Image (cartoon, coloured by chain):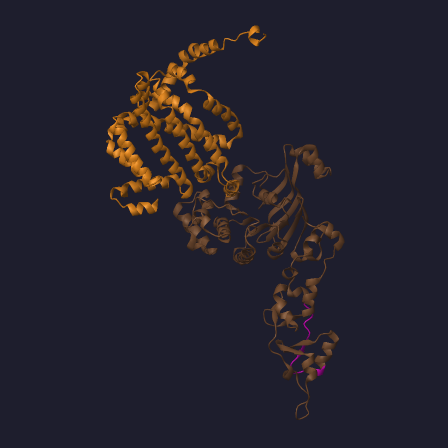
Chain colours: A brown, B orange
Amino acid sequence: MQAKLSVRNVYKIFGDTPAAALERLRQGESKAAILEASGATVGVQDASFEVGEGEIFVVMGLSGSGKSTLVRMLNGLIPPSSGEILIDGEDIASCSPQTLRRIRREKVAMIFQHFALFPHWTVVGNVAYGLKVKGMGAAERRARAMETLEQVGLAPWADSLPSDLSGGMQQRVGLARGLATGPQILLMDEPFGALDPLIRRQMQEELLILQKTLKKTIVFITHDLNEALLLGDRIAIMKDGQLVQTGTAQEIVTAPADDYVAAFVADIDRGRVFTAEDISGPPTAVQLHSDTPDQARRLMEDADSHALHVVDGERLVGLVTYKDLTAQSPDAMGRPGTLRQALITDFATTDGNAPLHTLYTDAGSGLPIAVTDGRKRLVGVVQPRDVLAQLSTETQAPTTEATDAQPR
Amino acid sequence: MLSPADLATLPFDDWVNAFVRGWLVPNFRPAFRAAQVPVTLVLNNLNAFLLFVPMLLTTAAFAAVAWRVVGSGMAIFTLVGFAFIDMIGLWPETMTTLAMILTSVIFCAVIGIPLGILSARSDRMWKVMRPVLDIMQTIPSFVYLVPIVMLFGVGMAPGIIATIIFALPPIVRLTNLGIRNVRSDLIEAAHAFGSTGWQMLWDVQIPLALRTIMAGLNQTLMLALSMVVITALIGAGGLGLVVNTGLGRLDVGGATAGGVGIVILAIVLDRITQGLAEKAKVGRVSLGRSLLGLLRFQGSGGSGSGAQIKKAG
C-alpha cells in the first residue's frame, strides 16, 4: 500500500514563543515545566504516521489529547510548529497559500463533529459548497450535489434547511458535502460524536458500506475505542499530544504498548475486535461414508469435545454429537448405527472474518460452529467455550497498575 | 491655592482656531466642497423623487411594506399617520426629511459596513476604529457643527454630513460584532473547503451576520432621525426647520406639529427596519430574496390577494 498521507515528526505548540518552547521540549523538559516557564502549551508532540491509499486510519484519544489539533494540521487549518505533512509528496506545512487552497479544494475534505452546516442554505446548497468554491456553475454543481445526496440517501430532502433535519441526517449532509468535490482524502473529526448511540452505530455501518465502493483515504478521529476498533484498518492511540501506539485493532487489544492503552482496552467489546478465524481450531471432521461412529467418538475423546463435523468428500454436510452416537443401538438386523443416522443437518456456519459478537447466539446452542470458506468447505471449527473464553480474557498488562492509568 | 493653571495656561482654543481657520479651511475647503458633491447628488434626486410621487402613492407603498414585514396593525398606523401629516400641511417637509434621512443612511451603510467588515477581520483595525467610534458617539454634535459650516458651508448637504458623523458608529460596531460572532466552526468549514477571503465574506460571513447588520442599520436610522432638528440649525430644511422656526417664534403649535411629524416618521421607519432585521433571521434567506419578496408583494398587493400575502409573511 502506497502512503497517501505521511506525517513526519509534527509538533504543535500554542503560545507566543513556539520556537523556544520547541527547543525546551526537544531537550526533554516536561510539558508542565514548559508551560510554567514560557506559557506555551504543547498540543501535539512528535507525531509520525503514514496512511495508505484507501485505508481508514483512526486516531483515538480523550478530550485534550491533541487529536483535533492533529487532524486540523492535516489540511492546514492549524499550521504545525515543526515537521512535515505530505499529501502525495506535497508538504502542507510549508506550501504557499495558493497551493494549500488547491489541495483543500481538490484533495482533502473535512467532516466536522457538530456538522458545521451553513444554516442559511438548503441541504443541496450545503452539499454544493465545495463545488461553488471551486467556481463551478450553478446548474452543474446542483446536479453533482444531487448525485452525492443520492449516495447518502438524502435526495428527497435536498431543498430543506439543515435545521429541519435530525442529527444523523445533518451529518449525512456533512458527509455528502465532503464527498461532493471528489476528494481522495477525508478527514473526519469525531463525525459521529454528537449523535445518539443507535444512530451512531447505523452511521458507522453505513460508512463502512460506502467505503467499500468509495475507497477513500480516511483519517477518522474518535474518543470511542469501540468505534475505533470497528472502523479502523489501523488505529493510533493518542495521549497528551503523543501517539502512544499505532497498530491494527487486534495488535492493540492483544499487545497494548503501555498501561494507558491497557486500561483502555480492558473494557472494550472484544466481540467486535476478534473474528471467528482468530479463535478457530483445526478443521477436524469425519467422512460420512468411510468413517464409523466409533472412530468419530475416539476423535472427540482425543479433542475433548462433544460434537464433530461431518464431511462428504469436501462438502460439509452436518455434525454428530457424542451423546447421539453413544445412544445409538444396533438396528433390528444387529448392524451397528451409522453416522448418517445420527447426523444433525441443521448446524451453524460462519465466515472467517465474521466478528465474534455475531457468534454469540450460535455459541449458545452448545454446538461447535463451522468456519467455512467461499466454497463452503470446512476451514476451521469454533468451539463455543472458546468464544466465551476469548470474551473474558484479561489483557496482558498488570491490572493493578492499569487502574492507576485509568483514563479520566 | 496652587493649581496647574498658575504655572502655565494652555491656549487650547487658540490652537484649535489656528488649526481649523488657519490651515484646514484655506487649504482643504475645495476638497471638502468636492466631497459633498455625491451627497448633494443623492439627496437632490431622492428629494425630487419623493416630492414628485403623489402623497397617496407614497403612503400606499409604505403601508404595503409595513404590512408585509410587520403586520396589518402597522399598516393601518402608517396610513393614519401619513394622512395626519398631510392634513396638518407638513407633507412636503416630511418628504424632505425622509430624503435627508435616507441619504444619510445610504452613506452610513456605504461607509460603515465596509469599515465594520475590516474591523472584524483585523484586530489592529478594530483597535484604531474603536476609540474613533467612541469619540464620534460621545462628542456633542454641536461641537462639530461649527467646523462643518466652515468647511462645507450651510445648507442641506452639510447637515447630512453632520448626520453621517453622528449616525455612523452603530452600523460599524454592529457589522463588526455580527461578523465576529459568526460561528467559528462554520468559518473553519469554509476554510477547509478552500474558500478565499472574498468567498468567505460573501457566502458565509455577511449572510450570517445580516441580522446584526440590519439591527445596526436600524440604530443608524434612528440616530439620523434624532439629528433632524439639530441640522436645521445649519440650514437643513424639512421638519427640523419647522420645529426650529416654531421655537424661534415661541409658536408651540408649529413646533409640536413638526415634532409629531418626526415621531410618526420615526415609528414607521423603525418598525419596518426592525421587521426586516427579524426576517433576516427567521427565514434565513438572503437579503436579495427578502427584497424580492417585498417587490412580489407590492405587485400582488394591487390585486388584493390578502390571504396569500399573510401566508407568505
B205 sits to left or right of B239 = right
User: Residue A283 magenta-drawn?
Assistant: yes
Q: Is residue A280 above or below residue B158?
A: below
Numbered-mark total: 0
B153 sits to left or right of B84 = right
Q: Residue furthest bottom?
A: A333
Residue A296 position, x and y percent, is 70, 80
Front position in the image: A161 or B71? B71
Front position in the image: A399 or A321? A399
B172 sits to left or right of A81 = left
- Residue at the (27%, 26%) spot, across then down: B90
Q: Quadrant of residue B148?
A: top left
Magenta region, mostly helix, strand or loop?
A: loop
Residue B78 position, x and y percent, is 30, 35
B276 sits to left or right of B131 = left
> Is residue A2 among the parts visible in the rendering?
no
Residue A333 position, x and y percent, is 66, 93
> Is residue A215 among the parts visible in the rendering?
yes
Q: Is residue A190 above or below residue A347?
A: above
Front position in the image: B187 or A208? B187
Q: Which residues are magenta?
A: A280-294
Residue B293 position, x and y percent, is 33, 42
Position of the N terminus of chain A, as image quadrant, is: bottom right
User: Residue A187 magenta-drawn?
Assistant: no
